[in-house]
């Protein structure tokens, strides 16, 4: 069957199956009304069609041009091509961000990343000597957000998240955000230890050499098998094709043989990962067929951001992951729901990842939370799927006020109709493109169409104000040469009056208090005669030494083990305050961007509420807070921590406080 192409801008004739289902629904509804029966329950008892299952498959870093059904002739994707032939393929679908965590938050919440300040991939920050500083940003998807899983769970759905989460550490894991089942969902942004099991993700029963994507599918199939008669929501965010680029050897060999001179895709290992992704999507759809669930299951396939341009080609789109050009956030989107979505249809109406939330709620007949729904940025695309109309919205917006490792700079963008404007925050310059005529964004129209550029820029600025989008600020360390990466080897201090635990640290007295230096991670801890708690306030001053990559932290906990200690302090060179747990680096970190100078002195106040499980640190008028991932019953040690640096501290003042 040839695809049916349409712009989705008006009603069209329904397919025969669609028409039959609608007539059957009207008959059931009329009969139920005459018998005083709830029509939803009547239809559900017949075949549960009124409450469809939802399967949302999310690839990681997959580019718009990576699939056969989107024109790729090197990658073999028969399962996804078949899915597109059975459903609707979108040509102008967008992620809400060009990097992963913000888009994932937009899917879970239905809100633009700028609205909840989750604008950067978690664990990331801009370079220390960049022109602009990161604005404040969230370090997890807040528990106060009513996720799509929580909304569906309240409507009677069984829910599972199988795969990458990357929306905060414990206690912000999927099981606390509406999912009955969480498999492999942690704070990690890439597979810890690689794709071949066993790795650091500690999946139980892992077989030597088993591929992570295959194992996640096994877990997802088990969930589907366990819920054949009740509605379920399966969120299946695969890690592929995120780095590390590790494909199966036999598939790499296959794609090495498929290479031809002049082709745009030349990475056989990446192609092997795409191949495995496609195979596993096929396993999911085959299971739905096996259990006769396909006709009442809505399947969505999407990716979280554009392809990484160093491992794949996004052509004809410009750039890729981390950029505000089309290659950074235009994605493949396929939706299949037999009897409702016309097979082989193609839609070119722009949609964006915040639309998943209201769309899935409408398909499921789930009311959601009224207060949360009032703040949604997405619109339901059910009219597009049904062919009954086009959702009404003013424009699609992006806000990425950070630098990306891929080369993107702080920027924002807006698409209105065929026109797209990008604002670059370093110097404020604007680019304007007509995507209908210039999908590769090669011709800037700002000078040719100044009124259009002014109109779109005004809309973008007004939108940022409406959602309280945080903007970057000038960096006082811009352009400065970064300090040496490590301090010279130090001779560890074995004993020092007043300190009970000294680990890889050189400790000496100074005019302010103590000089603390380490060539690795150094700890100088005090074990008080009586444990502190349930509340405590710590006050100290940190003075960095300019010739080193300065940092310094208050460390505390119920054990002197570095794996368990909480650290609160400053990364001077990184221009941010941080609270994190365990050793550095940590995926579970609360950050606050702020201007910091190596020649400054900084007063830190740390308030700990063990009963509430919270820590708050103040540095002047700047504040950052974190929810602890584990229960600490009492503070039995506290002191200083430094990482490959030398810093000066005053003595620590420790007192109780009354929580607000």
Image (cartoon, grey):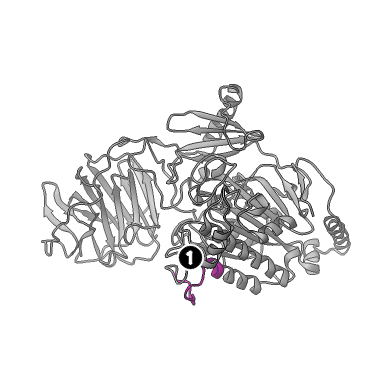
Does residue 290 lie above or below 575 as drawn? below
Residue positioned 49% across, 77% down in the render: 205
Residue 204 magenta: yes
Q: Does 97 sit left or right of 346 as displayed?
A: left
> What's the magenta bit mostly, secondary-structure-wise?
loop
Residue 523 position in % (x across, y down): 22, 60
Q: Residue at x 80, y 64 (%)?
A: 43
Q: Is residue 380 visible?
A: no
Near-viewer residue (259 or 301): 259
Is label 1 in a helix, a strand or a loop? Answer: loop
Horizontal side of 78 relative to 271 (left or right) equals right
> In the drawing, does residue 604 fall left or right of residue 219?
left
- Residue pictured at 86% horizontal, 60% vertical: 24
Q: 31 or 438: nearer the eye?
A: 438
Q: Is residue 338 above or below residue 351?
A: below
Look at the image and give the residue range highlighted in magenta. 202-216
Q: Which residue is mark 1?
A: 195
Q: Position of residue 368 (x, y in %)?
A: 64, 55
Q: Quadrant of residue 555?
A: bottom left
Q: Is residue 300 magenta?
A: no
Measuring 14% from the left and 47% from the top, which residue is drawn there? 512
Nearer to the camera, 31 or 644? 644
- For the N terminus, the image quarter is bottom right
In the depicted structure, whether residue 93 falls above or below residue 181? above
Q: Is residue 245 visible?
A: yes
Residue 441 against residue 39 in the figure, above or below:
above
């Amino acid at each position: 069957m040839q695809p049916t192409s349409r712009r989705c801008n008006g009603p069209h004739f329904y397919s025969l199956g669609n028409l039959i289902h609608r007539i059957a629904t009207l008959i059931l509804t009329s009969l139920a009304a005459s018998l005083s029966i709830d029509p939803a329950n009547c239809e559900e008892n017949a075949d549960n069609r009124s409450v469809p299952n939802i399967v949302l498959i999310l690839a990681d870093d997959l580019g718009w041009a990576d699939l056969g059904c989107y024109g790729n002739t090197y990658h073999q994707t028969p399962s996804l091509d078949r899915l597109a032939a059975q459903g609707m393929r979108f040509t102008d679908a967008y992620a809400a961000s060009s990097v992963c965590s913000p888009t994932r938050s937009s899917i879970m919440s239905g809100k633009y990343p700028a609205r909840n300040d989750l604008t950067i991939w978690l664990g990331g920050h801009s370079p220390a000597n960049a022109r602009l500083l990161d604005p404040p940003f969230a370090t997890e998807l807040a528990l106060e957000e009513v996720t799509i899983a929580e909304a569906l769970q309240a409507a009677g759905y069984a829910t599972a998240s199988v795969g990458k989460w990357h929306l905060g550490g414990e206690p912000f894991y999927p099981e606390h955000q509406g999912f009955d089942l969480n498999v492999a969902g942690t704070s990690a942004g890439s597979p810890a230890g690689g794709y071949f099991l066993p790795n650091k993700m500690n999946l139980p029963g892992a077989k030597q050499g088993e591929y992570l994507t295959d194992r996640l599918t096994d877990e997802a199939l088990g969930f589907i098998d366990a819920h054949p008669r009740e509605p379920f929501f399966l969120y299946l965010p695969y890690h592929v094709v995120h780095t590390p680029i590790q494909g199966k050897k036999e598939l790499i060999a296959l794609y090495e043989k498929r290479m031809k001179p002049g082709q745009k895709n030349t990475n056989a290992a990446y192609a092997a990962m795409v191949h495995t992704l496609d195979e596993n999507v096929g396993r999911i759809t085959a299971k739905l067929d096996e259990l006769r669930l396909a006709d009442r299951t809505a399947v969505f396939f999407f990716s979280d951001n554009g392809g990484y341009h160093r491992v794949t080609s996004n052509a004809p789109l410009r750039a890729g992951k981390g950029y505000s050009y089309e290659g950074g956030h235009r994605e493949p989107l396929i939706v299949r729901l037999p009897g409702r979505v016309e097979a082989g249809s193609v839609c070119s109406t722009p949609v964006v990842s915040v639309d998943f939330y209201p769309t899935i709620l409408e398909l499921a007949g789930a009311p959601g939370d009224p207060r949360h729904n009032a703040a949604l940025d997405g619109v339901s695309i059910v009219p597009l799927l049904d062919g009954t109309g086009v959702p009404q919205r003013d424009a699609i917006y992006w806000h990425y006020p950070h630098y990306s490792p891929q080369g993107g700079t702080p920027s924002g963008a807006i698409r209105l109709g065929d026109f797209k404007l990008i604002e670059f925050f370093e110097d404020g310059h604007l680019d304007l493109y007509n995507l209908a005529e210039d999908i590769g964004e090669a011709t800037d129209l700002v000078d040719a169409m100044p009124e259009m550029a002014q109109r779109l820029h005004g809309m973008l600025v007004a939108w940022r104000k409406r959602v309280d989008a945080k903007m970057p600020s000038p960096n006082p360390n811009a352009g400065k040469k970064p300090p040496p990466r490590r301090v010279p080897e130090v001779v560890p201090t074995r004993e020092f009056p007043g300190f009970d635990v000294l680990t890889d640290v050189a400790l000496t007295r100074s005019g302010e208090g103590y000089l603390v230096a380490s060539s690795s991670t150094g700890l100088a801890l005090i074990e008080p005669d009586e444990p502190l708690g349930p509340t405590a306030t710590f006050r100290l001053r940190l003075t960095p030494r300019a010739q080193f990559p300065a940092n310094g932290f208050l460390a505390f906990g119920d054990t002197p083990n570095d794996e368990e200690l909480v650290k609160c302090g400053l990364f001077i060179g990184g221009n941010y305050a941080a609270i994190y747990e365990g050793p550095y680096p940590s995926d579970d970190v609360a950050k606050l961007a702020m201007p910091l100078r190596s020649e400054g002195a900084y007063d830190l106040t740390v308030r700990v509420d063990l009963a509430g499980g919270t820590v708050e640190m103040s540095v002047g008028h700047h504040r950052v807070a974190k929810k602890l991932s584990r229960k600490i019953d009492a503070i039995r040690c506290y002191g200083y921590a430094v990482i490959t640096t030398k810093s000066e501290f005053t003595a620590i003042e420790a007192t109780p406080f009354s929580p607000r």
